């Protein structure tokens, strides 16, 4: 059966997870943060992912917004910025309106023009995802937003990928799954999706059982896989 559905991870794939820290660092009176924001942002993201995996393994699920706050607390304390409450609140507010990568809007429009179903499958809570999609002005070119909140376990649990079939009503053979996270691609490929890894940083392929079908540098060429 030919591909007719394109499912995207959200954070790091459609939306730039470093955008919140980058924006805050450029604002007035943030001289100290300006020096360390890349390190804070990277640690924030790393702990965010680690906490999702650990909570899945220990069966202590909490929503992604709570994890996002906890991981930011860790990153700020690691940089001795835990007492800058204004910075913390600003970073959290910015996370609700993360900037999309520059090619996202045009790529999604091309998919819709070719009658390809589009969806987001993300660890993010429904409210967070809705906020990011609306602030990015891509609401009209995304058909479905699927959150792990429906199953209360995080990627790469197979239960998460199953939600695409359950909610959209398609077969896994219809789906191209797109993510910038190698571990997410491995999980999706193991479930049975065709996969495209967006390798923006030119990282090595993860040493995991399932490999990406395609590797691209950004999202520009995604519509070509449906021709």
Image: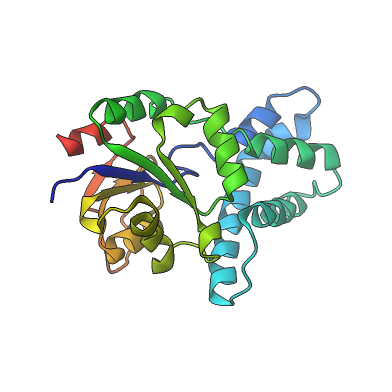
Could you tell me which residue is drawn at 51 percent across and 65 percent down? 151
Residue 18 visible (yes or no): no
Could you tell me which residue is drawn at 62 percent across and 44 percent down? 127
**Residue placed most toward the observer, 126 or 188:** 126
Above or below residue 179? Residue 109 is above
Residue 140 image position (x, y, % from top left): 44, 28
Residue 9 image position (x, y, % from top left): 42, 47
Above or below residue 214? Residue 142 is above
**What is the quadrant of residue 191 in the picture?**
bottom left
**Residue placed most toward the observer, 91 or 171:** 171
Left-right relation of 65 to 204: right
* Number of numbered discs on residues: 0
Could you tell me which residue is drawn at 41 percent across and 52 percent down? 181
- Quarter of the image for the C terminus: give it: top left
**Residue placed most toward the observer, 194 or 1:** 1
Q: Which residue reaches farthest bottom?
A: 58
Left-right relation of 1 to 155: left
Left-right relation of 57 to 32: left
Residue 89 image position (x, y, % from top left): 78, 40
Residue 174 visible (yes or no): yes
Could you tell me which residue is drawn at 27 percent across and 51 percent down? 195
**What is the quadrant of residue 91 in the picture?**
top right
Look at the image and name its color scheme: rainbow
Left-right relation of 111 to 105: left
Residue 60 image position (x, y, % from top left): 63, 73
Above or below residue 9? Residue 100 is above
């Amino acid at each position: 059966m030919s591909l007719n559905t394109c499912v995207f991870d959200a954070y790091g794939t459609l939306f730039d997870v470093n955008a919140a820290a980058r924006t805050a660092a450029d604002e007035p009176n943030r001289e100290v943060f300006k020096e360390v924001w890349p390190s804070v942002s990277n640690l924030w993201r790393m702990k965010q992912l680690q906490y999702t995996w650990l909570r899945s393994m220990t069966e202590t699920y909490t929503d992604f917004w709570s994890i996002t706050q906890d991981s930011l607390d860790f990153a700020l304390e690691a940089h001795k910025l835990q007492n800058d409450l204004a910075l913390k609140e600003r970073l959290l507010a910015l996370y609700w309106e993360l900037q999309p990568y520059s090619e996202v809007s045009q790529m999604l429009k091309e998919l819709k023009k070719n009658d390809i179903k589009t969806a987001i499958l993300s660890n993010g809570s429904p409210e967070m995802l809705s906020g990011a999609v609306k602030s990015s002005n891509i609401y009209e070119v995304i058909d479905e937003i699927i959150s792990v909140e429906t199953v209360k376990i995080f990627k790469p649990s197979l239960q998460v990928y199953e939600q695409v079939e359950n909610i959209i009503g398609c077969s896994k053979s219809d789906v191209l799954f797109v993510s910038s996270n190698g571990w997410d691609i491995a999980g999706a490929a193991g479930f049975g999706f065709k996969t495209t890894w967006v390798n923006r940083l030119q990282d090595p392929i993860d040493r995991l059982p399932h490999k990406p079908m395609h590797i691209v540098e950004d999202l520009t060429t995604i519509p070509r896989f449906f021709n």
